[in-house]
Image (cartoon, rainbow, N blue to C red):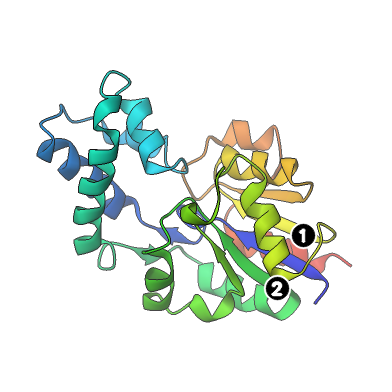
Amino acid sequence: MNKTILFDLDGTLIDSTDAILNSFQGAFKALGLTSKNNEEIKNLIGYPLEQMFRMLYPDKVNLSKEFVLTYREIYTQIYLEQTTLLPKAKEALELGSEIADLGIVTTKGGKFTPILLDYLGVKKFFKTLITLEDVTNPKPSSEPIILALKRLNKTQENAYMIGDTILDIQAAISANITPLALTCGYGNENELKSRSMVFLNAYEAVNYIARLN
């Protein structure tokens, strides 16, 4: 297949909001920290966990690694039951797999990603999974996209990155592939529109790609 479609995960294909927020708030409580507003947390989804914590608690950076460990202990217990596919996500992957090689490029940890995709019944659609541990520099760096293309033995030609945050869009532009933004996730719509074409969900974005020559 001459096309390549790379997908972000959280807010693009899956709704993991409850699992993420409950794990954050549980970790804050376990560490004796004042809880943060859920909207503050949601606005940072897409960044690596440790970076999110440092942005939320710039005066508590010494606790960042302990936070990540605590978060993951909680997340492990709840993430499967508290995560669902977003509307039309499976249809997007079914259509996408007919016209392109598909991959995941996420800042989610490598331990959870394949298990979650398998649980949701969509792991079979992907030929590569790039997670946080696979790279030195996560999105918005181009590194994870370049690695995904390398593992797929594909070039930037006819390659697309579908994501819901400005980090996905910046990474795609840096990697010299076409970004397609979604409004079904955590990103700011106006910010996304300033850098990319915007679609309601993953299916609409894939359908657009399918109609291209």
Horizontal and vertical percent for residue 189? 57, 37
Horizontal and vertical percent for residue 31? 13, 35
Query: Which residue lies most toward the right here?
Result: 213
Marks 1 and 2, the one that precedes in the sequence: 2
Q: Which residue is mark 2?
A: 101
Figure quadrant of the C terminus: bottom right
Horizontal and vertical percent for residue 26? 16, 44
Q: Amino acid at mark 1?
A: Ala
**Real-space Cα separation, disc 1 to disc 2, in angstroms:** 9 Å
Q: Residue at 65%, 70% (x, y): give it.
A: 102
Left or right? Give the position of 21 relative to 28.
right
Q: Quadrant of residue 136?
A: top right
Q: Quadrant of residue 128?
A: bottom right
Q: Residues within 10 Å of mark 2 (few under 14, many from 20)?
A: many
Q: Is residue 199 visible?
A: no
Q: Amino acid at mark 2?
A: Asp
Label 1 sits on a secondary structure element that is: strand
Figure quadrant of the N terminus: bottom right
Residue 127's place in the image compared with 16, above or below, is below
Q: Residues within 10 Å of mark 1 (few under 14, many from 20)?
A: many
Residue 25's place in the image compared with 154, above or below, is above
Circle on res. 159: 1
- Name the one closer to the observer, 43 or 86: 43
Query: Which residue lies most toward the top here?
Result: 59
Left or right? Give the position of 206 relative to 136.
right
The image shows a total of numbered marks equal to 2
Q: Is residue 39 visible?
A: yes
Residue 70's place in the image compared with 43, above or below, is below
Q: Quadrant of residue 149?
A: bottom right
Circle on res. 10: none
